[in-house]
Amino acid sequence: MPSRALRIGVVGLGRAFGLMLPTFLQDPRVQLVAATDPGAMPCQQFERDFGVRCSADAKALCDNPEVDVVFIASPHQFHAEHAVTALQSGKHVWVEKPMALTLAECSAMVDAARRANRLLMVGHSHSFDAPILLTAQLIQSGQFGAVRMLHALQYTDFLYRARRPEELKTAQGGGVIFSQGAHQVDVCRLLCGGLVRQVQAHCGVWDASRPTEGAYSALLRFEGGAFASLTYSGYGLFDSNDWMGNVGELGHDLNGLPKAKNRRLQIQRQGEPDAVALEAHLKAQRNYGGEGWSGMQGIKPAAHHQHFGPLIVSCDLADLRPTPKGIAVHGIDGTSMIELPPPIVPRVEVIDELYGAIVKGQALLHSGEWARATLEASLAILQASQTESRVNAFQYQVSPACELGSLSL
Ligand SMILES: NC(=O)c1ccc[n+]([C@@H]2O[C@H](COP(=O)([O-])OP(=O)(O)OC[C@H]3O[C@@H](n4cnc5c(N)ncnc54)[C@H](O)[C@@H]3O)[C@@H](O)[C@H]2O)c1
């Protein structure tokens, strides 16, 4: 049980790493000690910022005795391989969402963690957000009666952000089901008890130049009868942050920032030679160490909690609306607001859970088993849409494995 900070080795220094960097810099419970990435620029930046040589590859990083936890932020298709390598090297693993591309890969990861007696945590997903955790705690307390219905909606320009080629190919984990369903399904499972029993869905592939799912509407039924509608558009010209008080997904006030429409116009250069390579380059350029990286000084504190769009969950005695500032409770006696103090460290909930599990021996909420169930439900959305039928067979659904009241907020 280390009393010192957990020493983190990072596999993949791209966008996901850039999003966690403010947390790494501000939370004394974690320390960055190693990294690996095939890109020269992010490695050079890491070496300058943290004064350590980057490892040659994931295997070398996993063999580094200085590393306690391997944070896997490489593209989806590498998650399983990198996680199993790290677990077999005796490291704890924290892997980005989605856990992997297939249920077989997820099971291999879960099995490797069991065999190695090491921890496997999956995230960040927006079900870590404090307003979602508090809403789940309120539901689990029983004070508002049974949960009956949930609606979640998110409109973004996901499909028109600069992408690697595989992010636009469903078979390789591209499209909004794998990347964004991993948030929305996870949030919805947490609030509705976890056990998905039926899925109906339609997915939209509307732009032949970006031939993967850019939108979906799904209806999930849960054990106990609660049902949830989940809608996501990555083709959005509307930006659903407008319905969250103009607070962005990362908790920043959005005054004056460019809207989705501008980025869509930027990316529509598909006729150009080398457009695919150019686009991947554009993505890397904006990442950690790239020419467009604004540096550590460009990291701005967020005034509000992170979120994943408008959401309302109906219980017998109240409709609950998590917001970036707290929970709006629309109850029988009127509406009240349970305010949450603004976050001091962004995404601190992720470190709370990781540190709580490794150092204090607490049960993980976002375990491999939990994330496998989220992938199973996400894959069911694809299947239900492709086959135009209901999916009723689920093998891996689990309830939250810990008392939510025990999670610190
Ligand atoms: N939780 C979140 O908010 C969030 C946000 C963005 C991405 N993600 C997840 O993070 C993962 C990466 O996505 P991204 O948008 O950061 O992609 P990205 O392309 O921005 O970054 C991926 C990085 O991994 C590196 N990489 C590629 N192959 C590698 C290998 N074999 N070993 C080590 N590094 C390798 C790339 O060079 C790149 O720097 C995805 O699974 C994605 O779903 C999560």
Image (cartoon, grey):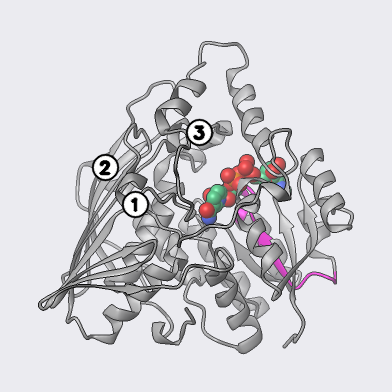
Residue at 21%, 86% in the rendered image? 143
**Which residue lies under the disc numbered 3?**
161
Element type where label 1 sits in the image? loop
Residue at 85%, 66% in the rendered image? 64
Q: Amino acid at mark 3?
A: Arg
Q: How many marks?
A: 3
> In the image shown, does 161 or 335 lie closer to the viewer?
335
- Residue extent of the magenta highlight: 65-79
**Which residue lies under the disc numbered 2?**
385
**Which residue lies under the disc numbered 1?**
245
Which of the labelled discs sits on residue 279, or is there none? none
Which image quadrant: the N terminus?
A: bottom right
**Looking at the image, residue 402 lies above or below residue 180:** below
Structural distance between the alpha carbons of marks 1 and 3? 23 Å
The residue at the far left in this view is 332
Residue at 61%, 54% in the rendered image? 79
Element type where label 2 sits in the image? helix
Whether 309 is among the magenta residues is no
Element type where label 3 sits in the image? loop
Residue at 37%, 48% in the rendered image? 246
Residue 208 lies left or right of residue 12; in this view the side is left
**Looking at the image, residue 174 lies above or below residue 320:** above
